[in-house]
Image: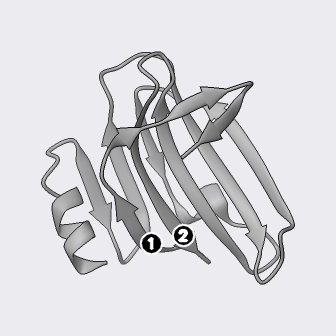
Amino acid sequence: IITALARFRQDPDVRIDEDKAEISFHISGPLTHIKVENCVEGTENCVTETVKVPQKTRITRETVRTVYDFMATVALVDSKAKRLLFSFWMYDGDVLLTSHPTVVKINKGEWKF
């Protein structure tokens, strides 16, 4: 996790504030979406929401906060290029994991990682 966060921080357009559990980023590509998947811990009960976001945006603990103890997977996607720009897990507002950009297939409105 530390290695992943260190590599993630190399992007000059990305800022991580671990104390506030906040990630700020700027993406130049168009049609950028964010996917937030909330899953009840220990179950397969998941709710996925995909919304368009402006090119400059900020993800905070409130972005994925729910009234339950959820694990949320958040992914920023350039749907035009079909690229997963980055993704990370948040648990009760704490950033747990980030991943490198990778190709993502978009099929019938569903994100396929």
Label 1: how many residues lie within 10 Å, few (<14), some (14-19) or many (20+)? many
Are the residues flagged by discs 1 and 2 in contact, CB closer than 8 Å? yes
* Residue occupying the point 31% across, 78% down: 1
Could you say where residue 6 lies in the image, as x and y percent from the top left? 17, 68
Q: How many marks?
A: 2
Task: Answer with mark 1 or mark 2, whichever residue precedes in sequence.
Answer: 2
* Residue occupying the point 83% across, 77% down: 43
Q: Nearer the viewer, residue 8 or 83?
A: 83
Q: Amino acid at mark 1?
A: Val
Could you say where residue 65 lies in the image, as x and y percent from the top left? 68, 66
Q: Secondary structure at mark 2?
A: strand
Residue position for label 1:
95
> As drawn, is 25 to the left or to the right of 13?
right
Q: Secondary structure at mark 1?
A: strand
Residue position for label 2:
90
Q: Amino acid at mark 2?
A: Met
Could you say where residue 89 lies in the image, as x and y percent from the top left? 51, 66
> As drawn, is 68 to the left or to the right of 112?
right
Could you say where residue 90 lies in the image, as x and y percent from the top left? 54, 69
